[in-house]
Image: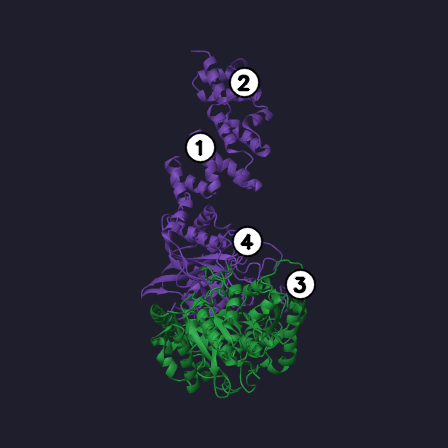
Chain colours: A green, B purple
Amino acid sequence: MDLSSFNACQLLDALESQQLSAEDCVRFFLKQIANQNATLNAFYTVVEESAMASAKSVDQRRKKGLPVGPLAGLPIAVKDGICTHNVRTTAGSPMLENYVPFYNATVVERLWEADAILIGKTSMDEFGMGSSTENPHFGGTLNPWDHQRVPGGSSGGSAAAIAAGMAPIALGSDTGGSIRQPAAFCGITGLKPTYGRVSRYGLIAYASSLEQIGPMAKTVEDTALLLSSCAGHDPRDSTSATEPSEDYRAGINRPIEGFRIGVCRDHLENGLSVEITSALKQAIDIFESAGAQIVDIELPNSSNAVAAYYVIAPCEASANLSRYDGVRYTERAPTDNLDQMYSKTRADFFGDEVQRRILLGTFALSSGYYDQYYLQASKVRRLIQQDFETAFNGVDLILGPTTPTTAFKINQCRQDPLSMYLADVYTVSANLAGLPALSLNCGFDPSGLPIGMQLQGPRFKESSLLRAGHLFQSQTDFHNRRPA
Amino acid sequence: MSVKATIIVGLEVHVQLATETKLFCGCATAFGASPNTQTCPVCIGAPGALPVLNRKALKLAIKTGLALNCEIEPNTHWDRKNYFYPDLPKGYQISQFDRPICRKGYLDLIDPQSVSSGRRVNIERAHLEEDAGKSSHDETMQGGPTKIDFNRAGTPLLEIVTQPDLRSGHEAKTFLNELKLILSSLKVSDCNMQEGSLRVDANVNLSLATQEGNQATPIVEIKNLNSFRSVERAIEFEAERQLQQWNKDGMTIDQAPKQTRGWDDSKGHTVLQRIKEDSADYRYFPDPDLVVIRTTQADIESIQAEIKSLPAERRQILMSRYLLPAYDADVLVNQGDTFVDFFETVADQVKDGKLVSNWLQQELLRHLNATQTDIQACPVNANQFVDFLTHIQTNQLDSSRAKDVFEQMMSDSVSVEQAMKSLGIENLDSEELTAICQRVLDENPEIIAQILKGNTKAIGNLIGKTKSLNKNVSPSQAREQILKMLPKH
């Protein structure tokens, strides 16, 4: 049976009704990885043995009528920036090339309790710093729709794995668009939850105040399924929200009649290719005919979002990455004094982009510069938050593009970091404001590359985004198309 | 050229708070465990691990702040202090920069025998932070590896910073004694300097009144201060050294950089460790992994309610209610709360504070010091001590034998009656006393003659003789009896 066209909910139905055994299911996806990963490089580590053993355990329990978790037997891929006990976790960095965590991230623990089956760790930009997964150390990941193009990043491995049918569902993390942009580039669905909705405990930190772990899958319903298992308060993460989480899949079919959908005309008409604009306009029509009301909104400070993001994120990164000092985690550059050991180890084992952001952040936090960079960026961040608060007084969600372009070519942006940063122009605001945001496929450009639509909502209103996204997918079939 | 030099001292005191677990994780803080056995992903800074505040530490910090008359910050937060050091696991320390939990307090010096008494030392701030690990370098200096123990990493510290209000080594020592007394009384720290629970750095310079006006010498930070006595000596040494240096080169605070010097206790001098050309840039910024801590007035009031009498108040009570001189009150209070509790329990029943104070200071303390025990482990409890003093007050025990009896009670942990019995002390009945006195009078007509001639002091001679006949004779009773029995003129 070709399971690659199954979405996660369908697989789960087959597993629950015992038409499909967990062993067969896991074996199928491991085989998919074996066939394609040499080309696509979406996985850094595949855990065949433990995956098969877990699958066996699920099957045995199910046969005996013993209780199993809500995701029992469902194979899952996890971004390599999320700690997995006894499974190598590199965060895409030479610094952690051989790092094997001795604890599980909270989300991984929750997936384990839900009886989901970890099949491997997916590729990423180093420490999440990038939008292309062209990782120079571990090798770039290819976009399954076009092998000349990048899958996006930084969760490029998770997105490519789903698009290519190597995994039905995956976890990514999103600091400035790292779930949504690769989801858009690879034609899948990705959700960045509200800041605090999913525990960050065990997510290798890049920019702590911005990032969230979130689900990536073929369909909106699949992301709702996975979010339900991951969300909820975690006493080990002080920034984790105490608001109760929900069964996000349960309410997904509720109609969206009366929804007020905000559209920022400026985002829709300027700086986008014609194809993206027209795909989004068609999407708007679909929502309107489903009973939603389209409302024009303004987000006046959004033009400063990228600038604020590229101050705040590097500042936090400069401290978060200080622990990789050569004393632990990696080989130590041989030198005869401590300061040289630090600088040489960090020069040798961090990639260029990581070093660039550490330097930026270190500079911006320095005495005499703090006020004009970090403090100023924090003020802009508050203004952006206020823009959204104002907008959400009048609308339930905001519709717009996920990215200004479809997937770009390998090497196209590598020599020009600034053009890469601008790929985040529509996504960073949700991180700065801590809002939930969903990206889903809403069409294809003339070269057959997927186009992403982004829905952003008020804090903790994931359910609104999921309902709207699900409605869109129930009336379209973009999400069912697969690369040739 | 003669100048008047004033010593200017400010202290930074790191207090390890007495929590069971670390500041941001659940690891134990017990001292002396095998290296790296009290660690977890959080306190070794494992990638992905996150800190969660130990509320007990915050409470102890607030309690200390209130005892030091500080304002408590209603919205405090955490900052990252960035620097590289091998025993600093995250490459930054979680500390507090611009909103410390406690600010603007003071502590009044109490030192009845010094002019410093009553001087106010302002507390600039007291903030919470996590400790680093401990590096052990190759002692042989052969270039062997440095070992790191992370057991200490993440232990809660309260850093208390005074304004430069202290004017001598002695004042610094007095301040530290009082601070330690308060911390112990609050039970916020065990204050063990040997185990590093209390660490002191002193910033010292001189203000010089010269003919050209006031000048100041460069500030020196003294480290490696392992006792309050070292703090005192180091400051006095440093004042002298700075004066000599200034006489030599005339360099002032604006002309020479700040220095860090280490105190060598055995040699009795400070040694240059580091010259701070410019202040280190720690690039503080708010820690995004932790949330703002709100402390309400109700929180503060409930913590305030847990603070019992502080040392200064207890001294006042000893002076007003028990009528002790300031010196006695100071000595007793300096022994700590349990000692004062003991005093008060006994004095409430004996109704003679000074008598109790004398016995506690002279005999009890001497015995406790000699046997290296503290009042908690005192072999004689308060009731037994009351009983003992009552025996003296009612003449059941003669004061000439009282020290022996007390010593016996302490060494055998027995009651006053048992001690007297084992020493063979019993009260003579009046018949026995009369018989002894009669015998002495009969045997010493020449002394009687002297007394009758007016040499009344000679009666002491007779009393001595009664005592050598029977050591249980009470001198005062014997005197009374002999006077009665002397032939009348």
Residue at image coords 41%, 84%: A278
Numbered tag placed on residue B347 in the rendering = 1
Numbered tag placed on residue B194 in the rendering = 4
Image coordinates for residue B362, horizontal then vertical, percent: 49, 36
Residue type for callout 1: Ala
Nearest to the observer: residue B452 or residue B485: B485
Tell me if residue B357 can be seen: no
Dot 1: element: helix
- Figure disc tally: 4
Q: Quadrant of residue A262?
A: bottom left
Q: Nearer the viewer, mark 1 or mark 2?
A: 1
Nearest to the observer: residue B87 or residue A11: A11
Q: Nearer the viewer, mark 3 or mark 2?
A: 3
Residue type for callout 4: Gln
On the image, numbered disc 3 is attached to which residue? A57
Nearest to the observer: residue A148 or residue B445: A148
Dot 4: element: loop
Q: CA distance from mark 1 to mark 2?
A: 29 Å
| Chain containing mark 1 | B
Q: Is residue B286 left or right of residue A2?
A: left
On the image, numbered disc 2 is attached to which residue? B428
Is A256 drawn above or below residue B111 in the view shown? below
Tell me which numbered mark, 4 or 1, is placed earlier along the sequence.
Answer: 4
